[in-house]
Amino acid sequence: MTQTASPAAPSAVDREARKQYLSIVALGLGIFMAALDLTIVAPAFPALQQSFNVSARAIAWVIGMYALFNVLSQPTMAKLADRYGRRAVYLADIAFFGAGSFLAFLSPNFGVFLVARAIQGIGAGGIFPTANAIIGDTFPKERRGLAYGVTGSLWGMAAIIGPNLGGVLTQHASWHWLFIINLPLAVIVFVLGMRVLPDLRPATRGPLDVRGLIYLTLSLVGLMGALNEVRGDDFWRSLVSQSVLFSFAAFLWFGYLFIFTERRAESPIIPISLYRHRDLRIADGLGVIAGIVESSLVFMPTLAVIVLGFSTEKSGYFLTPAAITLGFATPAVGIMLDRYGPRPVLVTGTLITALGLFMLGVLVNSTWTFLLALIVGGIGLSSLLGTPLRYLTANAVGPDERATGMAVLSISTNVGIAIGSALTGAIISSQHASHPVASIHRAYIVLGFITLLAVPIAAQIHRRTAAQTAAVLAANAERKERRAARRAARQAAKSAPSTTGDD
């Protein structure tokens, strides 16, 4: 009988690893697509205003509508994901986002365009928490940080690349291309997700908490309405305006009704018991500060124009070093999370971020100092925004509440973005006419001090024990040994000669 050595068939471990890598592609592209739409439309405002013949005040709703429905969608989609399974809800969110993009591309008037942006926001609001919950379900603790690092780098790069890409497409093609480019991405993510994402479903389901959902929606509408009514050019007077006070009162009242309802609901939208986890409370508090810091990205092109004298068209390109830094640093941050835990990563990242902001507020007087500050800030942001907070949240709550925990974290970050945008705009506008350079420097100094507030908060995270660190290092070493053994086996199978033997 003749026996011929053949390459070893892929083991179950190999197949599982390949499936996990493809899962990261499906989830990372979805996050990239949704994050890109937060900022890509801003350069197209003049073209949209001219195309639809609307005022500058009305055109602000292009981002406002997307952000509002994004925030409202997050807890709802997260609860549906915890209730009906992550894959089904994630794919539905991708379909919503694609449908909204197609409708925006075809919009005959501004009203239809805003509806399209709302549909996009609904889809994007579900993509973020559901994708991050799937990573928590799919990857073991010792590899979870790297997975969050990869998707986090895509999210950060999309947020910074968006304005530049939007400007190029609007200038050389038309604003319609900002939305049509989403369609092939949505199809790829949907098809790949159907094939590789795990279809995990809970064994039991409680009744849907409709009353809690209504109260939460009304409370968030009140909060976002109050923040959107705060004007940078008249900050203090707008804070006590009738519209802001009414919206904030609605936020408090419906928030009280929501908490009252959730304490008695059989299957609450956001279980109050979630906050028994100290690390989850810390993550949400840090999420607000991270959102305030993230809002500073919007004003960096303004700094390049006012302080360095660059044109508006070229100013956005100076964010490229920060995008590149985020892209390379965030996966490295994920590896450090796996090895050392979130506490030292967040404390260090917060300090570096504050340093970058102080550099923007004090040292920037030339192109080189601006680029240096952006690189330092990019390193810090990679250790603060997104990845460590999602890692902390995923480890703080159980699988049945993971998507809900991610949604609450996203809401906290979005609230921080709204607060930071209003505050930074107010500081810049306060003396912009008489001292424009001093006003924008002052804004970044204030943001630096706010970032330092995160240091004592991050220091309260549970410290990883020596035994836990040793277990993670042992798991990583074992995984490397398995990979080396598989490579050796494949190499031996390729080089082994055919053997002939007689029975």
Image (cartoon, rainbow, N blue to C red):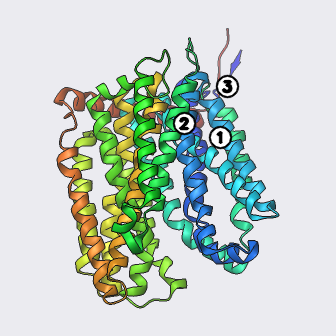
Q: Amino acid at mark 3?
A: Thr
Position of the C terminus by quadrant: top right
Q: Amino acid at mark 1?
A: Asp
User: In the rendered structure, which disc, 3 or 1, sits on the residue that comes first in sequence?
Assistant: 3
Residue 431, picture quadrant = bottom left
Nearest the eye: 185 or 277? 277
Q: Describe the element under mark 3 as helix, strand or loop.
A: loop
Q: Are marks 3 and 1 in contact (CB under 8 Å)?
A: no
Residue receiving disc 1? 93
**In the rendered view, does 465 fall on the left or right side of 196?**
left
Nearer mark to the viewer, of 3 and 1: 1
- Is any part of residue 329 visible from this angle? no
User: In the rendered structure, which disc, 2 or 3, sits on the residue that comes first in sequence?
Assistant: 3
Mark 3–mark 1 Cα distance, whole angstroms, equals 50 Å
Residue receiving disc 2? 130
User: In the rendered structure, which disc, 2 or 1, sits on the residue that comes first in sequence?
Assistant: 1
Where residue 149 sits in the image (x, y, percent)?
A: 42, 47
Where residue 69 sits in the image (x, y, percent)?
A: 59, 47
Q: Amino acid at mark 2?
A: Thr
Where residue 168 sits in the image (x, y, percent)?
A: 63, 76
Q: Which mark is residue 33?
A: none
